Image (cartoon, helix red, strand yellow):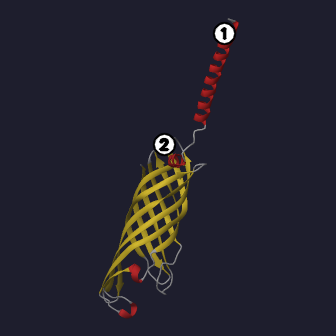
Amino acid sequence: MKRLLNLTLIIILLSTGCGVNAQTKKAVQKKKAPVSLDSLLFKRITPRLEIGFNNISTSGTQTSATYYNGLKVGLTADYNLKNNLSLMTGILYTLAYSNKLQVYPKLQYARYLTYGHFLQLPIHLTYSLPVSKNFKFFAFGGPTLSYGLAQYQNVVSTYDNSTIGITSDYIDIYKSKLNQFDVQAGLGGGIQLKKYQLKAGYDWGLLNINKLSTGVINQNGWNISIAIKL
């Protein structure tokens, strides 16, 4: 009888120990469950739809300024860092239009009607200053990569003078006068209310986009836009 009792106690102790060990292993496994890198990155990214207005100018040392008004639309994303910092990038498309009139003596003129298609890739570091849970100010700065898809110009001139290049014509400027790629330095700021952002900035062209030997031409511009969190 004593042996039977001792054997029963041993079986109970072994069963209890195995149960506790199993529960401990489950808890450790649950605690050390690997975190998906994709999931971690996704939680840090805030995608946005951005719609806005651009005012672009091309001017140079030997070239008068040409101003374009354009609409831009695209997708951007904020990658949230630490200490109220984030990195914003994305892809933006701009359709711009210019109507430039050059007047000469004896009521003669040359009118330049130009349509431009551009892609911009901003890489901006943003610092936010929260005022409340749903409202904050922010400032941003960094490079913007710009690529001109096409820029068609229709010249209507009553002052045809081929010696100085003023003749009626229809051309793609990128095939004859300007380079398509540009790097710009951007700076700006704005406000955010809940999922909406209102922001404005200015971009300074850093490269000479003139293909010809008639001096330096830079492309600059300011912009204003609304960005909506998706």
Q: From what the image shows, is residue 43 above or below residue 19?
A: below
* Residue topped by disc 1: 4
- In the current view of this chain or complex, which residue is farthest to the bottom? 163
Classify residue 117 by image quadrant: bottom left
Q: What amino acid is found at the position of numbered circle 2 in the picture?
A: Asn
Residue 90: percent from left, percent from top = 46, 59
Q: Residue at the spot x=36%, y=82% of the render?
A: 102
Q: Is residue 133 left or right of residue 9?
A: left
Q: What amino acid is found at the position of numbered circle 1 in the picture?
A: Leu
In depth, the one of 142 and 113 nearer the eye is 142
Classify residue 93 by image quadrant: bottom left
Residue 40: percent from left, percent from top = 54, 46
* Residue topped by disc 2: 134
Residue 88: percent from left, percent from top = 51, 56
Q: Determine which of the numbered discs, if any, sits on residue 55 in the image.
A: none
Q: Residue at the spot x=49%, y=45% of the render?
A: 135
Q: Residue at the spot x=55%, y=48% of the render?
A: 37
Q: Please tell me whether mark 2 or mark 1 is closer to you in this view.
A: 1
Classify residue 175 by image quadrant: bottom left
Q: Residues within 10 Å of mark 1 (few under 14, many from 20)?
A: few
Q: Residues within 10 Å of mark 2 (few under 14, many from 20)?
A: few
Q: Secondary structure at mark 1?
A: helix
In depth, the one of 16 and 60 nearer the eye is 16
Q: From what the image shows, is residue 34 above or below residue 48?
A: above
Q: Residue at the spot x=41%, y=69% of the render?
A: 118
Q: How far apart are labels 2 and 1 at the CA level? A: 71 Å
Q: Secondary structure at mark 2?
A: loop
In depth, the one of 114 and 9 nearer the eye is 9
Between discs 2 and 1, the one toward the N terminus: 1
Quarter of the figure with the N terminus: top right
| Badge 2 vs badge 1, beta-carbon distance below 8 Å | no
